[in-house]
Image (cartoon, rainbow, N blue to C red):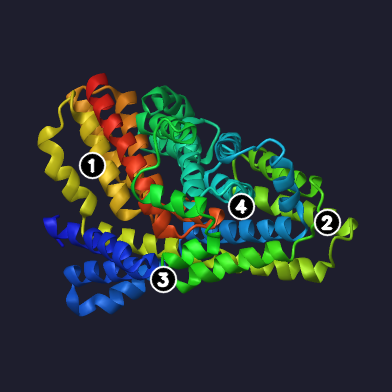
Amino acid sequence: MSEPTALSLIPPAVVLTLAIWLRRPILSLVIGALVGLLLVDPKAILNNFSEISLKVMGDETIGWLILVCGSFGALIALLVRTGGAMAFGRFALKFAKGPRSSLFMTFILGVIIFIDDYLNALTVGSTMKRVTDKFKVSREMLAYVVDSTAAPICVLVPLSTWAVFFGGLLVDNGVAAEGQGIAVYMQAIPYMLYAWLAVGMVVLVILGVVPAMGPMKKAQLMAAQGAPALKQVDLEQVQTSDEYALKAIEEEFANADTHGKLHNFFVPILLLVAFTIYFDIDVWLGLLATLAITLPYYAVQRLMPLSEMMDQMIDGFKSMLPAIGTVTAAFIFKDVCDMLQLPQYVINSLSPYMTAQMLPAVVFVAMAGLAFATGSSWGIFAVSIPIVMPLAHSVGADIPLVIGALLSASSFGSQACFYSDSTVLAAQGSGCNLVSHGVTQLPYALIAAVVAFAGFIMLA
């Protein structure tokens, strides 16, 4: 397409409609991508899909994601099978005396693991779901708390993968001088309103100040009535791959060593955090180093033969395939939206409202909408910053405020979009159906987004 048009809005609408209707996010994303390619060139739809999918699979980010997610699954499987995760559950139950305190422990653990939203979402959810199950907390509520302390917390802490990535983009686009990317990023932290509000909102929900509402209320009532986690998922009519992953996790716990030691949980987790920091916030290197020490550490204790550890790791890797498939399909869909020039259409449509006073609020709404529609929080920032920042300079807008609006939009998209990477992993780690998680947490995300929008107007 030579010029961006309103037709670019059709694929996101198709994806959102089908995902809610069919509850099959991968199928919805693939159909949405095919609809978009039909609009680009009906005759070359299969060739274009083939080229885009091969390009995505060859992308360094996707390769990194497959390795990181799969290795997380492998590590989690070891923690479960050796009884380490169960031992942590017994330890946590000494402090968690009810639903509220178990969720508050989940929140605290999410704040502590601030380095990366993937690390956060998978570790916290997998660790705490047995504890919250004990107190009849729905997996949807657990996934919401996990998701609210994943991207929003990582955005607010300058020592995180988000800060490293976005700080680098600020330097690459001339917004910050060489070596000053993190410093400029830190200036914008007070203005990352959505992230602050999302974290505040989850605390209010845990304390009961903000009540369970809509689909979340229904999920909580089902859990309170004693419906087991797998039964809740079945009632939602989820896709077979989700059921397979959840049953695999339940079987892992059923076969876990009931006399597992707490140090077999804490040592790998602490190593993972320490190595990730040591390797300049590189989660993949942190995982490799952690596994390189954890395997001999378990072997010396004769917890299981090396061959059995390998089998457990492979099973753990396989349990992450639904999450990997969803994120890969989301990347393909995002590339199709780029072909349709969806970001350019949205920005062009809103450009008449781009005044110094309205720019932060308009940027937040536009980029949040794009991040939500495409499931690409980092990608939308990378695409929009070369367009938005020169515009911000030309109209005399407050630069840290505009950066805060962009980061707020990215964190909203990361949390609210049901097929964004961190949302997928929060649901996977918590053992919750993906679409159920997205639907139940959306009202809270929208409340925080509306308040953030009002805040950007007032601050400008």
Give x and y (percent) for residue 14: 23, 64
Q: Callout 4, which amino acid?
A: Ser
Front-lying residue, 460 or 3: 460
- The answer to which of 398 and 138 lies nearer the viewer is 138
Q: Label 3 is placed on what type of residue?
A: Leu
Q: Earlier in the sequence, mark 4 or mark 3?
A: 3
Tell me the SS state at disc 2.
helix
Query: Which tag, 4 or 1, sits closer to the chain's start?
Result: 4
- Residue that carries the numbered disc 3 in the rendered image: 54
Residue ID for mark 2: 298
Residue furthest to the top: 459
- Which of these two is toward me, 376 or 106? 106
Between the residue at mark 3 and the residue at mark 1, the CA separation in whole angstroms equals 30 Å
The residue under the point 48% across, 61% down is 232
Q: Residue at x 47, y 51 (%)?
A: 140
Q: Which residue is mark 4?
A: 126
Q: Are marks 3 and 1 in contact (CB under 8 Å)?
A: no
Tell me the residue that label 1 is attached to.
366
**Residue 9 - label:** none
Sequence-wise, the earlier of marks 3 and 1 is 3
Camera-near label (4 vs 1) is 4
Question: What is the quadrant of the C terminus in the image?
Answer: top left
**Front tag of 1 and 2:** 2
Q: Nearer the viewer, mark 4 or mark 3?
A: 4
How many dots with numbers?
Answer: 4
Q: Amino acid at mark 1?
A: Ala
First along the sequence among labels 3 and 2: 3
Q: Is 83 drawn above or below residue 142 in the view shown?
A: below
